[in-house]
Amino acid sequence: MRLQDLGIDQLLESVRDAVIVADTRSGRIVLWNAAATKIFGYSSLEALEHSWTVIVPERLKAQCEAGMARYRDTGHDSYIDSHAVLVLPAVRKGGEEITIEIALSPIEAIRDLEGGNGRFVLAIVRNATEHKEVEKVIKEREGCFRSLVQNTSDIITLLEADGTVRYISPAVERVMSYKPEEQVETNAFDPVHPDDRERVLGIFAEVLKRPGLHPPFEFRVPHKDGSWRYIEYVVNNLLDDPAVRGLVVTSRDVTERQRTEKALVESERRFRQLFENSVDALFVHGEQGRFVDCNAEACRALGYTREELLQLSVADVATHLISEEERRVKKGDTLWERAMQGEPGRIVGFEENELRRKDGTIFPVEVGVGAIEYESRKRIFASVRDITERKRAEEELRRLNEELERRVQRRTAQLEAFNNELEAFSYSVSHDLRAPLRAIDGFSQILLEDYEDKLDEEGRLYLRRTKDASQRMGHLIDDLLDLSRMARSKMRRERVDLSALVKAVAEELRRTQPERQVEVVVEEGLVAKGDERLLRVTLENLLGNAWKFTRDQPHPRIEFGSTEYGDTRAYFVRDNGVGFDMAYADKLFGAFQRLHTTSEFEGTGIGLATVQRIIYRHGGQVWAKGKVGEGATFFFTL
């Protein structure tokens, strides 16, 4: 069969779909147009040499051949009779498999050249591969968009023009605890907070007037738990878009943001209140020194209005500025540079400067410098305090110190002169007074030895008393000289083992009176800084007194130890001797002050005065506690 014979060759060649006719009896292709060549790759001449199965995939050939045989034998087949458009795979000349849309139609029996009646099938074919790919891409994109909508943290709502909810995304359950189906077909504006409703309806009316995206706005709606939540809405008016025909609303819960913003506003209010009411002048400026903020005290101190000050910089009011040479010397460690490198909100240091008022007068200030976050930028914060009065006080103190120094020098000279006189007096006492005493003592002894038989008992008693008095006077002179030397001798501070000193003094006391059995308890490891020679004299006096005043005890006991005294350490000598009445405690450390007669206990009354003088020279204190018949404790600090 030829196209020319049918008279429709040009018509078939011009159509965009492939037109194929096959003989059911032989299976041969008998008609093949240009569109078929484009789809399958076979030329018309090549196609006419093949069976129609040349374009059928191998896996479908048996099924297709069975259908064709059924039509050939009976004139009927469900696919051919239905004229339905089938989507099937097909094979091109090179073996590439493609997807086609094919519609099969029977052609009435035609008498062939041999005189028989042949059955033919007409196939109209369209390449659906690209269409299928497009559909696939569209489905994938639809799935992607659906997934985005379903899983976004924001709520996406589609509203009708009257506010009816046509669709709402699952995020509404995460944000507001409502299920989507509970919201669909409700009016979006019914639950709006009463205080916000009028404003919201006004905004919505404006949205309806103008298509497209509108600025965000906020209002309150109820959470399912009954609490009010601030929700931010962004509306896109797509009522004119045929694919949408609605209002697309994206919303999110901004309740926490609202709380944070309110807290920030309150914090800013408190900061501004503190800033403005500070007794110090406060400034905020940039790295170039230009002021960006200041408080009322800054304006008062410098005599400018706030507007005037904000037109100035640090260089306009400070008399001392950091020079480049100073920057090089300090290697970037200036106060201002440390502030910019430091943590915002902290003062990194202070320095003194001078500021110039609007009227030209200059006054001294102390400046504390730090960094601060101000309007989202790091700035320098300066706290300035007028120190005019402090400078005056410092100058007065300096003048007084100089005067005191002069007085001290005068008094020192006087004291040196007095010490020299005292030294001369001591020498006189040592030499001039001892000679008569030695004479009295010596002649008394001669009288007792050579004239004893010429004196009666009363005479001999008077001589013995004279001799004893002269000896006591000698001891008293020795003690006075010792006391004088204690006050004048130079001190040499060093590490002193007090525990070892006490043991040494106690051993000497035992050697002087080996017949006495005295228990001496010493705390180990007590070490202090002081003059070892003077501290030994102190311990000799304290331990000597304890040894003396325990002589009538059947079990005498002396203890040396330490205890906490405020923020320092106090040392003590404790005994179980005769003790003393605390009413007379203030007399203990005075020269020649005795609480017992010489007939009871020997002594001159100089020992404790010497102890006090030594302890005072060490910058310490000395005191005593006691009770009559129950012993005494003497404390001292160094």
Image (spheres, grey):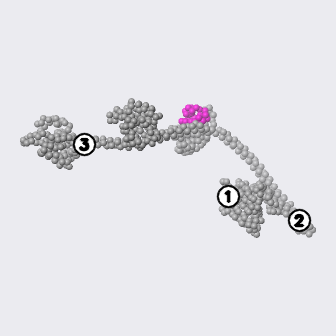
Q: From this viewpoint, which residue is outermost toward the right? A: 454
* Disc 3 packing (10 Å; few <14; some 14–19; many ≥20): some
Mark found first going from the N terminus, 1 or 2: 2
Q: Is residue 297 above or below residue 473?
A: above
Q: Nearer the viewer, residue 484 or 189?
A: 189
Read off the magenta span. 290-318
Q: Is residue 80 left or right of residue 172?
A: left
Residue position marked by numbered label 2 in the rendering? 461
Mark 1 belongs to which amino acid? Thr
Quadrant in the rendering for residue 616: bottom right
Residue at figure coordinates x 80%, y 61% from the top left: 603
Q: Residue at image x 90%, y 68%? A: 452
N-term mark: 3 or 2: 3
Picture quadrant where residue 607 is located? bottom right
Question: What is the count of numbered marks?
Answer: 3
Q: Residue furthest top?
A: 209
Label ID, residue 563: 1
The outermost residue toward the left is: 115
Q: Nearer the viewer, residue 435 or 326?
A: 435
Q: Residue at x 55, y 36 (%)?
A: 293
Between discs 3 and 1, the one toward the N terminus: 3
Residue 37 appears in the rendering = no
